[in-house]
C-alpha cells in the first residue's frame, strides 16, 4: 500500500470514530449482516452501519458476499499496528512483554532471600511487570468505546 493510501486510510478509518468502531467490531465478529453490525456497534439504524461498511469496503477492509453479509479483511494500520489479532481477541503487544516479566518475577521469587542479585532481579522484574501491565490496560482502553 502506498504511503498516500495509508495516510488516507488512517484519516478516514482510524480518524473517524464510528468507522473505526465498525472495523473493530468486524475484526471480532469476522462476519455479519448490516443489521447485526448496527446492533453490535449500537447504531440507531442499519443505514449508519451501511454507510461505514461502504467506506471500509472502499479501502478493502471488508467485502460483501453473495448473501449480502460482510466479511472482514484483517489489516494492521494506524493504532492497530500496536496490537495482535488472536482469534477474536485484539491484544496489545505490551501484554506479551508483561507475560515475560510475570514469568521472570515468579522465577526470581523463591531466590530473593539467597542473594542480593536475585533480590535486585526480582525487584526489576516486578517493576517491569507493573509498568507493562499498566501500559497494556491503557492500550486496551484505546479500543473500548468511551
Image: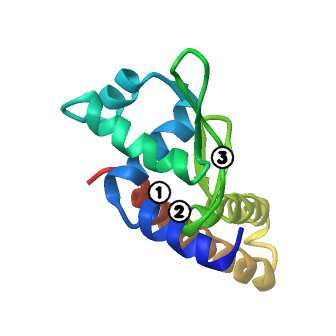
If you read the primary sequence from the N terminus, does the residue marked by circle 3 or circle 2 appear first?
3
- The spot of residue 24 in percent (x, y) is 48, 46
> Quick one: 85 or 8, which is closer to the camera?
8
Q: Are marks 3 and 2 in contact (CB under 8 Å)?
A: no
> Quick one: 78 or 51, which is closer to the camera?
51
- Up the image or down, 130 lies above or below 20; here it is below
Q: Residue at x 38, y 45 (%)?
A: 52
| Foreground label between 1 and 3 | 3
- The residue carrying mark 3 is 74
If you read the primary sequence from the N terminus, does the residue marked by circle 1 or circle 3 appear first?
3
In the displayed structure, does residue 5 sit left or right of residue 11?
right
Q: Residue at x 61, y 18 (%)?
A: 66
- The spot of residue 26 in percent (x, y) is 51, 37
Q: Are marks 1 and 2 in contact (CB under 8 Å)?
A: yes
For the residue carrying disc 1, how many other residues have a C-alpha within 10 Å: few (<14), some (14-19), or many (20+)? some
Q: Residue at x 71, y 83 (%)?
A: 120
Local secondary structure at mark 3 = loop
- The residue carrying mark 2 is 136
Task: Say if residue 89 shows up in the picture.
Answer: yes
Task: Say if residue 144 shows up in the picture.
Answer: no
- The residue carrying mark 1 is 140
- The spot of residue 51 in percent (x, y) is 35, 42
For the residue carrying disc 3, how many other residues have a C-alpha within 10 Å: few (<14), some (14-19), or many (20+)? some
> Quick one: 143 or 111, which is closer to the camera?
143
Local secondary structure at mark 1 = helix
- Up the image or down, 65 lies above or below 100; here it is above
- Up the image or down, 92 lies above or below 26; here it is below
Q: Are marks 1 and 3 in contact (CB under 8 Å)?
A: no
> What is the CA distance from the residue labelled 1 to the residue labelled 2?
6 Å
Q: Residue at x 63, y 65 (%)?
A: 81
Amino acid at each position: 500500500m502506498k504511503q498516500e493510501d495509508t495516510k488516507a486510510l488512517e484519516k478516514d478509518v482510524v480518524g473517524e470514530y464510528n468507522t473505526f468502531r465498525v472495523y473493530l467490531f468486524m475484526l471480532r465478529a469476522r462476519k455479519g449482516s448490516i443489521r447485526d453490525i448496527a446492533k453490535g456497534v449500537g447504531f440507531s439504524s442499519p443505514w449508519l452501519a451501511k454507510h461505514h461498511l461502504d467506506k471500509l469496503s472502499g479501502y478493502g477492509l471488508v467485502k460483501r458476499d453473495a448473501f449480502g453479509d460482510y466479511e472482514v479483511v484483517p489489516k494492521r494500520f494506524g493504532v492497530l499496528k500496536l496490537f495482535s489479532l488472536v482469534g477474536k481477541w485484539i491484544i496489545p503487544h505490551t501484554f506479551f512483554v508483561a507475560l515475560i516479566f510475570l514469568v521472570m518475577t515468579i522465577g526470581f521469587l523463591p531466590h530473593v532471600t539467597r542473594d542480593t542479585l536475585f533480590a535486585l532481579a526480582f525487584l526489576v522484574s516486578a517493576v517491569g511487570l507493573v509498568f507493562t501491565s499498566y501500559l497494556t490496560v491503557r492500550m486496551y482502553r484505546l479500543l473500548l468505546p468511551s
